Structures are given as C-alpha cells and as structure tokens.
Amino acid sequence: MQALPKQFMIAARRHPAPEGWGSQAYGGLTIVSAPELPVTWLTGPDRGKVGLLLGWAVFAGQALQNGQFSLPPGASLEDFLDRTCGRFMCLFEQDGDIFIIGDAGGLLSLVYSPEHKIACSSVTLMQRVVDLDAAPEIAEQFDLRNRQGWIPFGLTAWKAVHRLLPDHALRISTWQAERVRDFPAPTADKSDIGATITKIADLVADNVKGFLDMGGTAAHITAGRDSRMSLACAHPHAAQLTLETIRAPGDGAMIDVLVGQRLAKIAGIKHRAIDLEESSVEEKAAWLERTGYSVNDSVVGLVRTVEKHDQGLPVLTGTGGEVGRAFYWQESDLAERTISPDALITRLGFTATPALVTAAIQWLNTTPHQNLTQLLDIAYIEQRLGCWAGPSVYGHRIPVPTFSPFNARNIYRLMLSLPADYRYTQRLCDDLVAHAWPALASLEYNRAPGLLKLRFLKSELKRLLPASLKSSLKRILSSR
C-alpha cells in the first residue's frame, strides 16, 4: 500500500490512520494528516481557538507555520480567509455548527461523503476506511486510469462522493456543501484600472515574501503570460529566486527554455533547465492512484522529473493568473448574460451526457451572476482550478507542493472587477508586467527571442493563420 503524501482525513468518528500521521480533534471531528502537512491553530484576541488550518498559507506577507497563529486585532476569520494565499483547508465554528472551507482556488482538494460522514483529500484515502460504490455513468465517461481528462462540477466516479468546490463550505451538521461566496461582475469604469493593477501587484509581492519565508527559492518560468506576471510581481524579492524551466521535446518547450534564460538574464538571476525524464508506466499509475483517479493529463508524465529534482521546498508558479485573462471567453460572450448547460459543458471541453447536464444545471442554478463573462470566470475558478489543479496536488510524491502567489480571494476579486473588454484583450497581463517590472515586457509571449525565431519556422508560420482557421483546425484534429 503506497504512502499518500500531503493527504488528510476529517471524520465524525475515528478511522484507522496510516502510521506516523498526526491527529487533532475539533468540534467533535477527528482530523488525521500526513506528517508533512502543516497544522495551524487559529486564535482570536483572547487566545481562544477560532479555527484549524491544514496546509500551507501566507497572510499579509507572513508564512503560517505549524503551531498557532493569532488573527490580527479586529480581523474576523472571514477577513483572514479573504486575504490568505496558499493551499489549505480551514475548519471553523459558526452559529453552533462546524464548517470546512478551502483556499480561493481549491488547490488543496477535498472530497466528502454524506453517507459515511467523512471528508478526505482523495477518494483513494477514503476507500481505505469505508466501502464506496462506483457511479457507472461517470466512471465510464471519465476512465481516468486509461484516458486523459478531469471531472467537473464536483462530481467523482463514486456514488454519493463529491468534491468540495471553491467558494463553497461543507456544513458538518448536514454533511452538505453550501455556496458561501460570490464575486463582483466586471465594471465598465476604466478610471480605476491603474489603481487596481497596483493593488494586485502589491498583494502578489506580499505573497511572494511569504513564499520565501517558507524556504522557497525556485520559480517556474515559461514563455507564457502567467509565470511572467508572477515573476514581475516578485520584483522586490527576485534576487532570492532561481528560475527553472523543464526542457522537453517539442518547439513549445524549447521556446520556454530560451525565453526563461533570457528573462533570467534581464532579471540578473540564475536559470536552470531541467531535462525531462520519461516516467515509467508504474510511476504514472501510482500518480493516478494518489490523486484518486480524478485527473489525468501531461503533468502525470512529469512525476519522475519532479521527484528527482525536488528539494523539499515550495516552487513558485503562475497558476491562477488565468483568472484575470478571460480563459474561457469568446468575443460574443461580452454581450451575453448566460449560457445553456450543454454549451457550458462544451466550453469546459467535455461531451454532454445526462449526468453532466444535470450537474451543470444545478451549478448554473446556484451560481449568482450578472453576465456570461462573470459566470465563465467563476467556472474557471470552481471547475478548472478546483477540479483539475486541486486534485493534482497529491500526485507528485514530494512533501511540499508548488505555490501560487495569485491564489487568494482578494486578488481574484480585484482581477474579476476589471472591465470585461479590458481583460478580453489580455491587457491585465501587459499592464501588470509593465507596472511591476517593465524590463520583462521586452520579450514577446510564447515566441523565441529575436533571431532565434528562425529556429521555429513552423511555429512562426502557424501564428500567421487567422484565429478562426486555427479554431476550425483544432476542432477537426480533436475529433479524429
């Protein structure tokens, strides 16, 4: 039976736990967790306990460590959670009930079973202590042992087992999840864009400081926008960083390395290219098992490389930067208010089936939104981050996960408040980099620097194709 690093179990009664795991009690619940998962008691002004936090967190530039953290005077728990960045789960008491809520993007994932009154980091862990029945329709559509994909809408391939989505809390008296947060619709006012960009940059920089307090020194860099934004906001602390890029076959990966090297030179810091090592069938299978067969994509193939080069410290990434970049939008969405369940499922990249349509209808009916662009932004946070990036945290057999300085609710709220047409044209990335570290804006995104473009003629020619033709070709190739 393989070990499950970084994982945890929360239950109404005590279940057998892996050897060496820690144990806590809170509100009638038993919490057991792997030794590398930080456990922090949150206290109020009177030093009384107001909550229990599992995982890695940064608040106001300070990394929370194992032990105890006292909320600032006058700060409520909700304010604390709003401003806290990282990968974590928080248990707290409110109105005589116990709730469990995760970080802004659901990046420390949790599944729960009302029938068994248990919540776990993965179904794999849950299956070790309770008997679960498969949900045939979902299991057949998402055969993630053998096919790539991920499961949206908080569904799992097991009956009566659900994934806790971002913006939702699990109420322990009922063992049901409830939406407890919503987001602002984009504003039409462009007068405050500069001030909003400054706020985002400052908040991300504080989170980078906390990342460094955790011992982190490495930052993942590619030729794309999100890691560039992360690096730009890290400007006040960049001298402490080393940039890393995985060197793999293919033009895209090679361009990542070349741009990463050039960015490091501009920044005056070190860069190292890490050669991709092919993972074995057994290593990939073990990765899938640790995640509870909830996600299967290219990251599975990184398991040997990541574990070989892991230094036991968090690595900075740009995950979550896409929240401000209109990831799921199309131009026609700017004038629409909502979307049909079938169209939403297609937009997320799936085929509509009865089970998915039912889940999409339920999600649409319980997600407040004023227009379609706002709805698609929430879908990115709750579906892609919460159901794709979240479960992936348990895959690599390393003690500390990657860390995104964007993953905080106050930052996502600022991003989503910006005008829709502004974000659709990718201005957020351009302006954030130009504000935080202008020199990094000198390199184009996802293109080799200068004359090195001549080494990638195929990629350069592809860029000349009209966007509509690219989309048509993509649909034709994906249907084969």
Image (cartoon, rainbow, N blue to C red):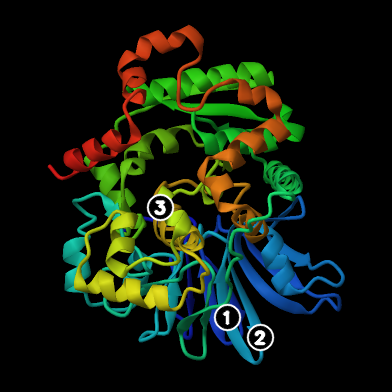
> In the current view of this chain or complex, which residue is farthest to the left?
480
Please state if 383 lies on the left or on the right of 63 as rendered: left
> As shown in the figure, which amino acid type bears the numbered disc 1?
Phe
Circle nearer the N terminus (3, 2): 2
Q: Tell me the SS state at disc 2.
A: strand
Residue type for callout 3: Ser
**Which residue is the site of mark 2?**
94
| Residue depicted at 77% across the width and 34% down the height | 236
At label 2, the amino acid type is Gln
* Count of all numbered marks drawn on residues in the image: 3
Tell me if 184 is positioned left or right of 367 in this view.
right
Q: Nearer the viewer, mark 3 or mark 2?
A: 3
**Closer-to-camera residue (359/317):** 359
Say few, some or many: other residues with alpha carbon within 10 Å of mark 3 (under 14 / 14 to 19 / 20 or more): few
Quarter of the image where one finds residue 118:
bottom left
Asked whether disc 3 touches disc 2, contact meaning CB atoms under 8 Å apart, the reply is no
Q: In terms of sequence position, does the residue under pointer 1 or pointer 2 come before the other? A: 2
Q: Position of residue 2 (x, y in %)?
A: 34, 55
Q: CA distance from mark 1 to mark 2?
A: 7 Å
Which sits in the foreground, 19 or 188?
Answer: 188
Give the residue number, with chain letter if any, for mark 3: 332
- The answer to whether residue 169 is above or below residue 289 is below
Callout 2: few (<14), some (14-19), or many (20+) C-alpha neighbours within 10 Å? few
Q: Residue furthest front?
A: 335
Q: Report the residue at 58% width, 27% height from top.
A: 243
Q: Nearer the viewer, residue 344 or 170?
A: 344
How crowded pointer 1 is (Cα within 10 Å; few <14, some 14-19, many 20+) is rated as: many
Q: Is residue 337 left or right of residue 200?
A: left
